[in-house]
Amino acid sequence: MFTILTRWVPITLCLLIFAGCSSSPTKEGEQEGAEVTEQSTGASGTYEGTEGAGATTSAASEAGSWSGDPLDDPYSLLATRILYFDFDQSSIGMDNREIIRAHAEYLASNPHVSVRLEGHADERGTREYNLGLGERRANAVRSLLMAEGVADNQIIVISYGEERPVSMMNNEESWALNRRVELVY
Amino acid sequence: MKYLLLILFLALSWQPAANAELTIEITEGVEGALPIAVVPFRWQGKTQTTPREDVSAIIQADLHRSGRFKTLPRNDMLAKPASGAEVEFKDWRVLGVENLVVGQIQPNGSKGFIIRFQLFDVFRGEQLTGYSIPTTAGNLRTTAHHIADLIYEQLIGVPGAFATRVAYITSITEGGNTRIDLRIADADGHSPETIVSSDVPLMSPAWSPDGRKIAYASSEKGSWGIYIQEVYTGRRQKVTAFKGINSAPAWSPDGRKLAMTLSKDGNPDIFVFDMTTRKLRPITRHYAIDTEPSWSPDGRHLVFTSDRGGKPQIYRVPSFGGKAERVTFQNAYNARASYSPDGKLLTLVTREDGRYRIAVLDLASGVMQVLSRGDLDESPSFAPNGSMIIYATKAGRRSVLAAVSVDGRVRQKLALHEGDVREPVWSPLQKK
């Protein structure tokens, strides 16, 4: 029943020689290490709050007077540099609009200053889609800034998608912290 | 690459039809798998030059790991024959072994070896195949994987994918610093090598069809760019550096073009870059997010993810551009699709009850089958023989790799490293 085939088949088998595959780690870009999440707490400005005003009756300011760069005023809306988003959304809520308006005013009156908008997503969903989503969020902020008079060349947009989470837990709280746009001056 | 002569070992008695039928016998994972014994290969040289690798153990582990074979532990073997002349088939029949692999290793020159092996059908008492393969000390593992491939192909009917490699991204955080590496390891997790090390995000590795280059996206110097790196020399070039996203590179089957996602025009769209003419062709132009392009094996189509319908779904478009048609309709979230080697299936990430899982979609019938069981599974990649899908999943808070057979019956966890491991991509088959 069985056909017995006696075959001499010379076969060349390419055995890959991996000897040449010495790894050469290419390391470029030492930049932008840990600056992302840091809020600028400004060593340049000094705060004179109302509480410590004592008997001096100089200015009638409610929130205190600030001498120095307004970006460094921890009580200013400009001190808020992270805007959070809903799941799979890039729409901006009313509270965030106020913050963005403050940044826009500052940028419009300081045309030499530029801001970097870094868009982020939570870990749910695919990485490349989330890269697009992070960019969409950053662009939503950019559009509002420009509508308030900020020039195009003052804004740099980059998305990091889900690649740079601030919180590593796999839960709602953590995801909410990671869905964000950071304004980096 | 080096071509070595492979001489057929002994006479070969062969029944293709009978062997092909063995492929149907696969049921629940290791249960019901094909019983096989791989006898330790006998060393024929002096003891001081013994090969450093246990070749037959590597072959046995490969076959076992595939889930298609039930391998006999060495301690259960009644005899340790090294050639067909020494085999008593009844010794193996009583153990329920259906196939038997025996072999021997001889020194060949100062650093080389010759490995001879034979595969037998125990019940018929016949040799199915046999080879004599010259190799070197540094290639013993690779040669063992090639032998496992030959055995797999003979018994299962499709080429094995053991002599392949997997590229993946690792992320290790130490003392507040995160290092992102692009690494390559053998398909069994051995011999990992770092080919890129970065302190900024690095993503979406993609093998060239000849397995000699990897394209990836990196955010070096504060902006995204697509890079192509030669695997064996480390040489690399920056392919694109447009404003915005430069990512999701995918090689055309002929290796001449790269499909990619660029957001230079304001939002992510699919483009095809011809590496010969250096011309860039827009494929999609839509205000939605279009990303994750992947070529059909015949090079005629691209599938991609788009949320133009509100939520991410898979669309297909001719690879020279044209009208995009929606491919997925089940579930509200489908993304990162790629074709099986035969072009009949797509593997993708789907969301079901809030869980992100790996699924296969049969393009002819439209039937989608969910294969993985995690909550946050992603980045599926077909083995080049189409048998398994490797993907990233969570084990607690850690990201690890796992593999599942296309029929969902065989499952593996691949614990490779400390830190997080993600975005696995299986290399093409090594050219024989």
Image (spheres, coloured by chain):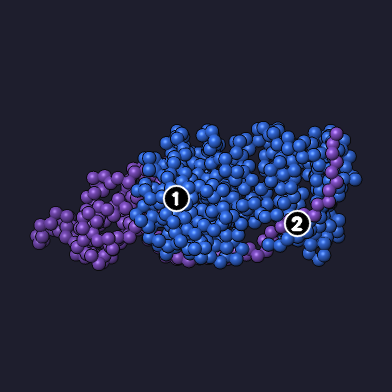
Chain identity of mark 2: A
Name the foreground residue: B348 vs B284: B284
Q: Chain B is drawn in which colour?
A: blue
Residue B6 drawn at (x, y percent): 78, 56
Q: The purple chain is which one?
A: A
Residue closest to the far right: B85
Residue A71 drawn at (x, y percent): 25, 61
Q: Quadrant of the N terminus of chain A?
A: top right
Residue A100, disc: none
The amino acid beneath tag 2 is Thr
Q: Residues within 10 Å of mark 1 (few under 14, many from 20)?
A: some
Q: Residues within 10 Å of mark 2 (few under 14, many from 20)?
A: few
- Mark 1 — residue? B321
> In the image, A70: left or right of B31?
left
- Mark 2 — residue? A12
> In the image, B341: left or right of B349?
right
Q: Do labels 1 and 2 share a chain?
A: no
**Which residue is located at x 48 percent, y 66 percent?**
A28
The amino acid beneath tag 1 is Gly
